[in-house]
Amino acid sequence: MFTKSQMHLAKTFIKIYYRDRQSLAFSLMFPLIFTGIFLFSGGEPDPTDIGLVNQSQDELSIKFVELVKEKDIFAVTEGREDNLKEQLIAGDLTAMIIIPEDFNQSNTSKLRLLLDASQVRQVDAIRDSLDSMLLSIERELRGMQPLFKLELEDVKARPQRYIDFLLPGILAYMLMNLCIAGSGYNLVEYRRRGILKRLFVTPIKPKDFIISIVLARMFIVIIQLSVILGLAIGLLKINILGGIYSLFGVVVLGAFIFLCIGFFLGSLAKTQEAIRPIALLFTLPQLILSGIFFPISSLPTLIQPIAQALPLSVIASSMRDIANDGISLLAINFNLIGILAWMFVSFFIATKYFDWQKVAS
């Protein structure tokens, strides 16, 4: 499958990496720091800070206040309207609920909801919770039974936490950064140290050189991500619903894609100063658009098709499908098609634009 020269070069690049004790120390410390952040933070979003002003103080309004306080998604602060409004304007509160004086069962009253305009993404969640609480109070007071009854059947489904959603995306993003650094940055460094100039006069072809580094860095990346995944499973109690082999299959394919893209970026850059902004120009938009911290469906409709086609998006979505939904790597879907397409495109541009003559000059 691989030639002797490719395997020999791959072993050589692995030895070069592990002789760099500083890089080795950072590569081992980063997974520990990464896991520690989520271990101590819990990985869950904080409750929404809201202010509550009860101008009625009757039995109905008091019951409503109690229901609001019972909601885990809210951190309630009671007080006077003027004081809470100052906190809202200062940004200490996300929203503010004012219960009017005529809030009682004999009149149709309206709650006032004041919201910080910079937190508009939370409007629907707050409004839905308030509507649900108002409806339950109205039914209880009027003695009304709901027209339909929901019968719950426990199928022992695993509730998804935010960390369950976040971890596959973070793994994919780390995979991209490790691979870009392992190929693009290394290519510029080998050029600076004259290694490529010496390899140019050997019978080694560009594809042999690229395949060798891909094999070496893939071995290193798998070890690094295995540390993170092992700590996440052991300390954060992450459950991988799909097969672990399918998950690592995506890691291998994703490493191939990003390593080849890294070669392409390293070929564009001629100095160490140039590779950093070029790599950042590639990685930063994907961090924002690829659904690492929030679903792609929350992006504007016009941008969603572009975001879904990005290489980081198809890798992160595939890892999330396997980890959270138990889907196999070989399941024919958009993500698998995207992975195969990016493997072809990345290898083509890596070998097409890898010019020994330019490197040697």
Image: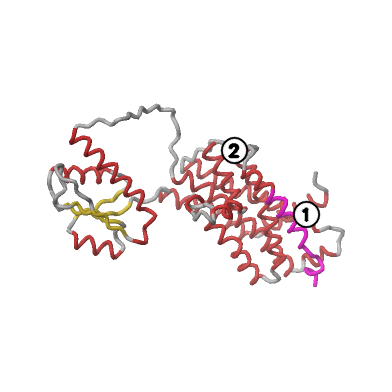
Spatial separation of the CA atoms under disc 1 and disc 2: 29 Å
Q: Residue at x 77, y 68 (%)?
A: 194
Residue at the spot of label 2: 244
Q: Is residue 14 magenta?
A: no
Q: Residues within 10 Å of mark 1 (few under 14, many from 20)?
A: many
Placement of the C terminus among the 4 image quadrants: bottom right
Indicate the amino acid at tag 2: Ile
Residue depth check, mark 1 versus mark 2: number of the one nearer the observer: 2
Q: Is residue 170 visible?
A: yes
In this rendering, the answer to whether 130 lies above or below 13 is above
**Disc 1, SS:** helix
Residue 245 screen position, x and y as percent = 63, 38
Q: Residue at x 36, y 50 (%)?
A: 124
Give the extent of the magenta segment. 341-361
In the image, taking residue 158 as reference, residue 140 lies left or right, namely left
Residue at the spot of label 1: 9
Looking at the picture, tell me which residue is in the foreground, 301 or 30.
301
Q: Main secondary structure of the magenta part?
A: helix
Q: Residue at x 80, y 67 (%)?
A: 197
* Mark closest to the chain's N terminus, 1 or 2: 1
